[in-house]
Image: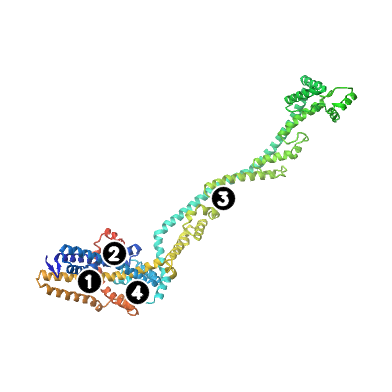
Amino acid sequence: MKRIFGLPIYFLIIIILFKTVYLLVESSYNTIVLDSGVIKDFSEEIFNNLELLGHNITSIGVTLLLMPLSYLLIQKIFNKGEWFKFILTMIVSSVIYVSIFFSLTSLMDYIVEQNKDKRYSAYYLNILKNGIANNVLGHSSILKFEDNNEREFSVDEKVIINNIFLLSYIDENKVVEKIATVGMDSFLNFYTQEKYENEFKEQNENFIQFASGLKELYVKYTEAQKKANKEFLKAKKESHKKYLDFKRESKNSFTKYQQEVSDLNKNIEKNVEKLQNDSSFRSKWNDFVKYYNRGGYYKKRALKDYNSYMIQKFGKKIEPSSWCKVPGGLLAPFVEITDGILGKIFRAFTGGGDSYSGCLNTYAITEIISKNYHDKWKTKTKVPYEGIDTFNDYLLNKEVKNEIINNLRKKGIKVSNSFNYKEKEFRNAYIKNVTKETYINVNKLYKKMGIAGIKHNLSFKSFVLSNQIREKFKATLSMYNKKEQNKVLRLIAYQRTERFYDDVYMPNLKEGLKKEFVLTKKQLFSSYKDKGNKSIKALYIPPIAIALSLIFGVLNAISLFSLIISLMLVLIFKMNENKVNIIKKIMVFSLVTIVVTLPFSIKGDNYFNNAQNILENNTSTLIKKYSEVLTWIFIFEKYNYPLGVSLRNNLTEKQLKSYGLEKIKRKKH
């Protein structure tokens, strides 16, 4: 197989193709990195995608430079077939690619570690960078602010923006503190405007809906209260009528009482007469006396039969002596001891009559019948059946009064124990009862409305500011802190909803943004350490990526150019391969010399000169060296950027999106 410079023709063609594709991609990537510095809504996702893409492209660039050397080395070590050498070269190249990729990743971590003391300055310099991109911040030493929302940044401006870390080498404390104070005010004002456009409309609509909901709830609250107030007025009007009804019922009760007493007396008279004329009863009594007086067994039997008969007729036992009482009760004790010697003396004294003879007189019968009915009366009521002659006596009777008070209380009319039947006390108790019952019903309704326990007859202001409203709308108000919740409710309570933006939304937003963006050194070295590290990466990776992109891009371009010319001299002009190899080496050396030295002879613009002055006055050796690289970058980007933009414009949205870079739009240069 034909070889040129010790390499197979097919391998050289592959190298040319790979390098050509690489240079096209590298040029596009370079412009993407430059443009990323002026993206208005630059995100961590875009940064991570750029970093990953940059590591891949740089690793490929280095691998392509070393691939021919890898092949020649393998060819010298292994005396194998062509395919073996090619496959082994691909394997070695893959190892080189992976090694470079992980080396770059480690390099980024090393940069973060070496610059960890710059977390604070890196964080605020990134904010300045974002502020410049959004045209709200600037810096006299680097890039002045222009009040132009449609501002287009030049290539030089993009280079200097991506090298914003230079500001940390002017007067770090002065610059950073100015950004952290004055600069942050401007930045937050801008950011709040952005948030206003995106979020205020939605929050304001939610607030207005909340206010409307409270008004509707208050309408329901007042409707329930109006119904309650109508009931109160009705109760006041009806209280006099209810008192008259009470008096009428009391009189009716007294009339009923009189009737019952009258019926009681009539029943007593009727039953006394009936018993006096009851021959059967008298016969039973005579039998009892006859056998009782015989004594012994007959006496016991007579007493047993007598008791059974009393229970049957009167429902209870009645002492036989009870039928022998006379007015004054003088006979009763003698009748009870008619047995034995005293009985005989008694009978001799009275004419020798039998025991219990002369009983069943009218007085005794009346007493027993009366007691029977009186006992039944007492089981029915505590009100006495005698001693009450007038309506006034009836009302003043203790038992009647207690009964009346208890009946009123059962109806909810809670009069005092000293109730004297006056209209005022009755009406007040009646109105109080209606009020209580009405409020019970109203409170049930309030409970259904979710405002249980709320006070009655509140104004709209007091209603909105009540604890029940806070509790009911706890979830809605949770998006605000306690101070803001008070403001929100007061705006609604005082019906000043148009002040929502100025009094609640904007202060809330600014406060939230301050907590989110205005960080102290202590925070960035402790709880926000990760954010500080990401800030260091975001500050240093773009300039490093741009430099590496150009360096390896130029080296591969020189390599590709010299390789193509050499192949033309050998294949077309049939020149000696050894001579061409010498020419190739001279060509590469010359091109590298021109690329390295020529930019320093070209006069730069203001950005170029400003950057050089900053770097040359710095004492850091590393930074002074970087001034030479930056000079080279300024010049080469003038030629690379237009080419990269034209190539990038050929990428589809889908291709950009696959790298997570769809926000970096295609544009005209």
Residue 597 vertical position relative to residue 201 in the rendered view, above or below: below
Distance in Å between CA atoms under marks 4 and 3: 65 Å
Q: First in sequence: mark 4 or mark 2?
A: 2
Q: Which residue is mark 2?
A: 53
Q: Residues within 10 Å of mark 3 (few under 14, many from 20)?
A: few
Secondary structure of the residue carrying numbered label 3:
loop
Residue 407 vertical position relative to residue 614 in the rendered view, above or below: above
Q: First in sequence: mark 1 or mark 3?
A: 3
Residue farthest toward the left in the current orientation of the protein = 574
Front-most of residues 529 and 521: 529
Which three-letter amino acid code belongs to the residue tagged 3? Gly
Whether residue 31 appears in this view of the structure is: no
Judge left or right: residue 422 versus residue 592: right
Distance in Å between CA atoms under marks 4 and 2: 25 Å
Q: Which residue is mark 1?
A: 555
Which three-letter amino acid code belongs to the residue tagged 4? Leu
Q: First in sequence: mark 1 or mark 4?
A: 4
Q: Which residue is mark 4?
A: 166
Q: First in sequence: mark 4 or mark 3?
A: 4
Which three-letter amino acid code belongs to the residue tagged 1? Leu
Front-most of residues 512 and 437: 512
Residue mark closest to the camera, 1 vs 3: 1
- Residue 466, by quadrant, is bottom right
Secondary structure of the residue carrying numbered label 2:
helix
Residue 287 vertical position relative to residue 621 in the rendered view, above or below: above
Q: Which residue is mark 3?
A: 453
Front-most of residues 363 and 472: 363
Whether residue 612 appears in this view of the structure is: yes
Residue 9 vertical position relative to residue 354 in the rendered view, above or below: below
